Image (tube, grey):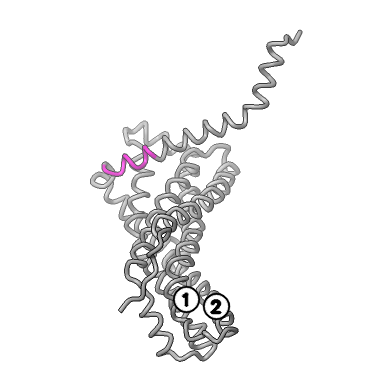
Amino acid sequence: MTVTSGDSKLATLRKVYGGPLAALDEIGKQSKFYGSGLLWTYRAVGRYKKEEVRLIAEVGMGNGALALIGGSAIISGFILFFTGTTGGTQVYQALRQVNLEALAGFTGATIQTRLSTPIVMGATLCATVGTGFTAQLGAMRISEEIDALEVMGIRSMPYLVATRIIAGLIVIVPLYCTALVFGWMGWKFSQVNGFGLSEGTYDHYFDTFLQPIDIVYSVLQGVAQVIVVVLIHTYYGYNATGGPVGVGQAVGRAVRLSLIAVMTVGLAVAMAVYGGSDTFRISG
């Protein structure tokens, strides 16, 4: 078979532009899926209450062996506690070198609230809630359960995707607040119990510099992160192919993309909220 110059040029164009065009096509597919999932939430609220209750319990407490230790709430709490302990240890040593260890409470009120908790909580959501959603939907896809739902007249997007978005939004506020408190506890524990800082001194500077609006902004970051995590992980699970191996690959791709997205969302919210010149005030 003779290869013409036109075929050769077409092959060259595919080789050069095939990657970028495929990436744009994937972005378009994901954007359409995300928009559809968000638009269907209004229908899922009143129609699939039992499924939402089940997912709320699953997201908050887990199932099986995970539920025995408290599920995502306890896991997130312990991760943030040890994150606070590690951060408090490093910050205290740095402050002691310049004889400012009395300001340790200030660092707990600002760094833990504004930076540490949002970043670590986003990664925790990816590892606990997100991976579970991808595996569940991926298993349903390869076993043709999603197709069976469509055949029975049940729209899969509101039933499988929108309900998970709603469950995540309901659970994230108490879950995030619990993690925030555990982070503060870890920060204080390392500096007061570990290094012997006066508890009264720590509490004074912590209460002085902790702004209630910072807590609100921090929780808003958590809400934005859970939306991003749920959408990304449900997309890869919903569109999984290739059997059990394909589901595992979908989980890996979802985790990679969601971690990048979580950091991007954190940066965007931080720039919007703290990018001005008057974002630091002393309360009281």
The quarter of the picture where the N terminus appears is: top right
Q: Secondary structure at mark 2?
A: helix
Q: Secondary structure at mark 1?
A: helix
- Give percent across and percent down for residue 232: 47, 46
Residue 219 lies in quadrant:
bottom left
- Name the residue beneath numbered marker 2: 91
- Residue 76 drawn in magenta: no
Q: Residue at x 50, y 42 (%)?
A: 236
Label whose residue precedes the other's in the sequence (2 or 1): 2
Q: Amino acid at mark 2?
A: Val
Decide: few, some or many residues near mark 2? Use Cα within 10 Å; few <14, some 14-19, many ≥20.
Answer: some
Name the residue at the left extreme: 46
- Give percent across and percent down for residue 264: 49, 52
Q: Which mark is residue 133?
A: none
Q: Residue at x 45, y 62 (%)?
A: 118
- Closest to the observer: 200 or 41? 200
Q: Residue at x 35, y 71 (%)?
A: 211
- Give percent across and percent down for residue 200: 40, 90
Q: Which mark is residue 107?
A: 1
Q: Is any part of residue 1 visible from this angle?
A: no
